[in-house]
Each structure stands twice: as C-alpha cells, then as structure tokens.
Amino acid sequence: MNMNAEHLAELHEAKRLLENPGLAARISNLVGSPIESAIGRLPAAWQKRVGGATEHALQYAMTGALSTLPEDGTRIAYPRLHKLAAGVSGGVGGVFGLPGLLVDLPLSTVIMLRSIAEIARANGERPQDVETRLECLRVLAMGGPGGADDAAESGYFTVRIALARAVSEAAQALATRSVNAATTPALLRLIAAVAARFQVQVTQKAAAMLVPALGAVGGATINLLFVDHFQNMSRGHFVVRRLERLYGEEDVRRQYEAIELAVLA
C-alpha cells in the first residue's frame, strides 16, 4: 500500500526526531565541552551507584507513572507541563550535585514516563494496555545517534530489534497478571535491558553535574534537555507505530529507510 502524502510527511518528521543528535551532543553544547571526557572523571563508585539507581528508577516509574493515567482521557499531550516539573526536580537536584541526582532520578523518570504515555495516547495507544506500557518503557532505551550513544547501538530499528524478544516475553508474562506486577521475572529482565541503555543517558547527565558552578539553574536546564530528548524519541516512535497499524511494519520500515538513504545521498 502506498503511503499518502500526509502520512509520508509524518514519517519524515518522525525520522528527523529519531535521528537527531544524541543527548551527549546536546549536553556538550550546553556545558561547552565534550560530555564523554566528563564521563571519564566520574568516580568509579558513583558510576556503579548510577547503574543501580537507574534500574530502581525504572521499576518505580513502571509501577507509578502509568497506573494513574486515565484510559479514557483526552488525547492531548502536555509536554510543557512535564518539562516544568522536570526542571523543578532538576533544579533541586542540581543544588546538591551528584548526591542530588540519586534523589532526582526516580522523580524525573516518573515524569518522563508519564509524558511518554501521554504522547502514546495522543497517537491512538491505550495507556492501560500491557503493550503500550512496555512500548513507553522501550522509548527510554532510545538514545539517538552520536557520541557515547554509539556503543549502545542506538539506531532506532536496531534498538527495537534488540529489545523485541524481551518486550515480547514481558508482554506474554504480564498478559495473565496485573500490569503492575513489577516482580514478574520477564518484566525485570526487560527493565534490566532498558536500564543498560538508559544508564548511558543518566551517566551523561551525572557527568554534566561535575561542571563547576552548574548549580540549580544548570541542573534544571539539563533536566529540560533530558525530558525534551525523550519526548522527541516518543513522538517519533509512536508516530511510526501508528503508521505501522495502517500500512504494516515492513512497508513503514522500507519507507523509513528510504528517507534515510535520501538524506545521506
């Protein structure tokens, strides 16, 4: 089936969002130096703590952020409201530097996942469905190209394929249990897989907090970048999913890849 002009334009925009520079490049533009070098200055103990905090934040967010989103509510998303909330959280965390990150991370992750779910709903997804919740979680594994993200194989369809089995197993396990059953082994495996990729973004955020005199204003600004990045990833992802429901996964991927080839030509 040939994609109509309106949907093709939407796919172009989704491609633009999903292939934008990664979070490391955007933070580097803010702090004035490559964020990869700042990551190397993070104490080893802190890198380990960030890893554990990331996984716990995702578990907390899955049981909190999505359970309160009405299924029958408006399909309008409110990204600015979530950016404001994340900015406040980041501002408070920025006052305390790296220790503040451990306090900010669960809250900002809940805010982001809630915003992602609203964007999913605006694209025709049902937030109460297991599949939608898992797709919201999958968005947090999407880093975008560039810099430190390369090591995480950040191409959009690469991430989808890499997590496909874990998402499928979690969906099957949760289909017969409560969607809030955070202790389901399959869900925990998926959260661990997402956390491994999401940690790349969190570590970049932590490294930026080492910048002297960053403070509350800088912490708030980084959180705004953080939330804006994943809102963009979710807009692109759920537009692609909406078009896949209309045209099929294979046709949409073929069109997506053709757009990429045209850009690179």
Image (cartoon, rainbow, N blue to C red):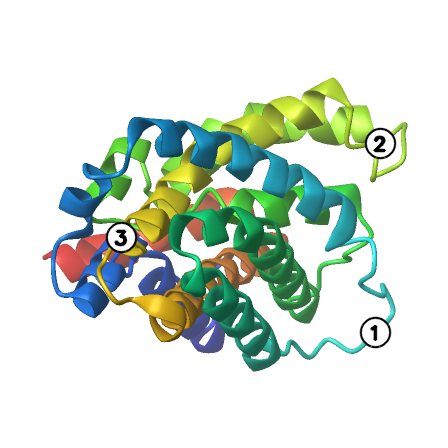
**239 and 163: which is toward the camera:** 163
Query: x, y (%) of residue 147?
Result: 19, 46
Query: Mark 3: which amino acid?
Result: Leu
Residue placed at 83% from the left, 39% from the top?
A: 180
> From mark 1 to mark 2, how far is it between C-alphas?
23 Å
- Is residue 105 in sight in this rendering? yes
Residue annotated with mark 2: 175
Residue annotated with mark 1: 73
Q: Quadrant of residue 155?
A: top left
Residue placed at 56% from the left, 51% from the top?
A: 103
On screen, residue 77 versus residue 48, left or right, reads: right
First in residue order: circle 1 vs circle 3: 1
Element type at mark 1: loop
Residue annotated with mark 3: 210
Q: Is residue 121 above or below residue 164?
A: below
**221 and 174: which is toward the camera:** 221
Q: Is residue 43 above or below residue 89?
A: above
Residue 42 got which mark? none
- Is residue 143 in sight in this rendering? no
On screen, residue 175 versus residue 24, left or right, reads: right
